Image (cartoon, rainbow, N blue to C red):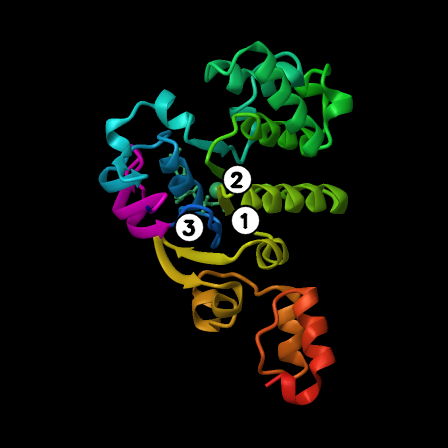
Amino acid sequence: MTAIAIEDLVFRYPSGVTALDGVDLRIDPGETVAVIGQNGAGKTTLARHLNGIHRPTSGTVRLDGRDTAERSIASLSASVGYVFQNPAEQLFASTVRADVEFGPRNLGRGEEEARRLADRALEATGLTPFADHHPYHLSPADRKRVALAAVLAMDTPVVVLDEPTTGQDHAAVTRIARIVAALRDEGRTVVAVSHDMDFVAENFARVVVMAQGRVIADGTPGEVFTRSADLERARVEPPQMLRLAAELGWARPVTTVPEFLDALRAGPSGRG
Ligand SMILES: Nc1ncnc2c1ncn2[C@@H]1O[C@H](COP(=O)(O)OP(=O)(O)OP(=O)(O)O)[C@@H](O)[C@H]1O
Ligand SMILES: [Mg+2]
């Protein structure tokens, strides 16, 4: 069954801005999907439809075959975890642990289970040492990972990350990549909005490109990042490795360091 089925989704803000202008998108269970596109393309607005923060102006969003319009936010939050682009909109408790435990408690997971899920999420995000700190005493980058931990602790089948690597140093980006891989290995569906093309190419099997409230390209990183006209329209720069390979005159689409090394070892004939 398709985990997420979006049909002809239109969303207009009360201000009159049409942020989504007819989005069609199907995502199967267990897929890892990155959504890219320039500022204002509608990525966050789309992501917020997945857990019911936004409701369609027209069109439908189905989750496991059920129209989300018929489900409460409380019911959707057991299925879809959404990590806010701006953690200030998501966090509210006076300690990191309380923020991370809130989700599983609220879903009725019980005291002990909530604590176990929170401990696991704090460990995965590298926040165990900060468990008793006030979230607002942390750096913006650490606070952003608290928002991620709070969603991981909810243990949902679908996880939506809005710009997870913003402001994160190399070690934290590696941690986040490991979290995406672990979610994938557990068979969860991961959707991430990102401006970080290297992170996208290295960690997602599918890339969806948005421009002006629509999906304009959809495919593997190798397919999408070689569609230069679409990338230009979406004002997206391809990953560094692809640009380097193109500069070297290679025809083979290479989007990550391991792919680059494979192509290098394959010699001129293997590079197309
Ligand atoms: N609360 C709001 N009220 C009115 N218009 C909004 C609101 N939030 C976003 N918009 C507008 O909707 C459009 C899509 O915005 P959205 O935040 O979904 O884009 P985005 O692709 O996530 O951008 P970014 O990469 O900057 O995060 C933009 O024109 C934006 O100005
Ligand atoms: Mg956004």
Crowd around label 2: few <14 · some 14–19 · many ≥20 (10 Å): many
Mark 2 lies on residue = 161
Q: Mark 2: which secondary structure?
A: strand
- Position of 138 compared to 181: left or right? right
Mark 1 lies on residue = 194
Q: Mark 3: which secondary structure?
A: loop
- Label 3 – label 2 distance at C-alpha: 16 Å
Q: Earlier in the sequence, mark 1 or mark 3?
A: 3
Quadrant in which residue 111 is drawn: top right
Tell me which residue sits at (39%, 32%) in the image: 51
Tell me, yes or no, whether the highlighted magenta stretch contains residue 9: yes
Q: Position of residue 62 (x, y in %)?
A: 29, 40
Q: Is residue 213 visible?
A: no
- Label 2 – label 1 distance at C-alpha: 8 Å
Note whether ligand 1 is within 8 Å of mark 1: no
**Front position among marks 2 and 1:** 2
